[in-house]
Amino acid sequence: MTVGFRKAGIFLASLLMLAGVTVPSFAAGGKTFTGTVSDSMCGAKHMGDAATCTRACVNKGSKYALVVGDKVYTLDATDKAALDTLDKQAGEKATVTGTEKDSTITVSSVKAAK
């Protein structure tokens, strides 16, 4: 009978360790947002072509932004691949994954929206 309890205890401990590893890695990915790539200065309203305006504003120091419905999120992205994707998707739909706080998304990944 002790062998059965020991196996059950080892199984339970293994299950708890697996859950402890899985939950933080899931939480680290963050939430997914899909919207139009813009810049934080212009938001949803651009002077002329959205892609050209977004790139020009970012080159002058504005941060990328994501317009989701009526909401404009500033994007905090430092990863070169994410920044390259945001540049390619300027004025277009993109899916951004990250954590949001106070209307700023700390970006963990970006991809073109389907």
Image (cartoon, helix red, strand yellow):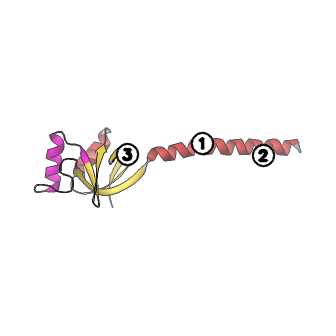
Three-letter code for the amino acid on which mark 1 is drawn: Gly
Residue 45, picture quadrant: bottom left
Find residue 8 and name its label: 2
x, y (%) of residue 114? 33, 61
**Point 18% across, 47% down: residue:** 41
x, y (%) of residue 10? 74, 41
What is the spatial separation of the Cα atoms under label 3 and label 2, in whole angstroms? 42 Å
Three-letter code for the amino acid on which mark 2 is drawn: Ala
- Secondary structure state at the residue bearing disc 1: helix
x, y (%) of residue 28? 46, 43
Q: Which residue is mark 1?
A: 20
Q: Would you place residue 25 above or below residue 113 in this image?
A: above
Q: Which residue is mark 3?
A: 101
The numbered mark, 1 or 2, whose residue comes first in the sequence reads: 2
Q: Residues within 10 Å of mark 1 (few under 14, many from 20)?
A: few
What is the spatial separation of the Cα atoms under label 1 and label 2, in whole angstroms? 18 Å
Q: Is residue 10 left or right of residue 108?
A: right
Q: Is residue 24 left or right of residue 10?
A: left
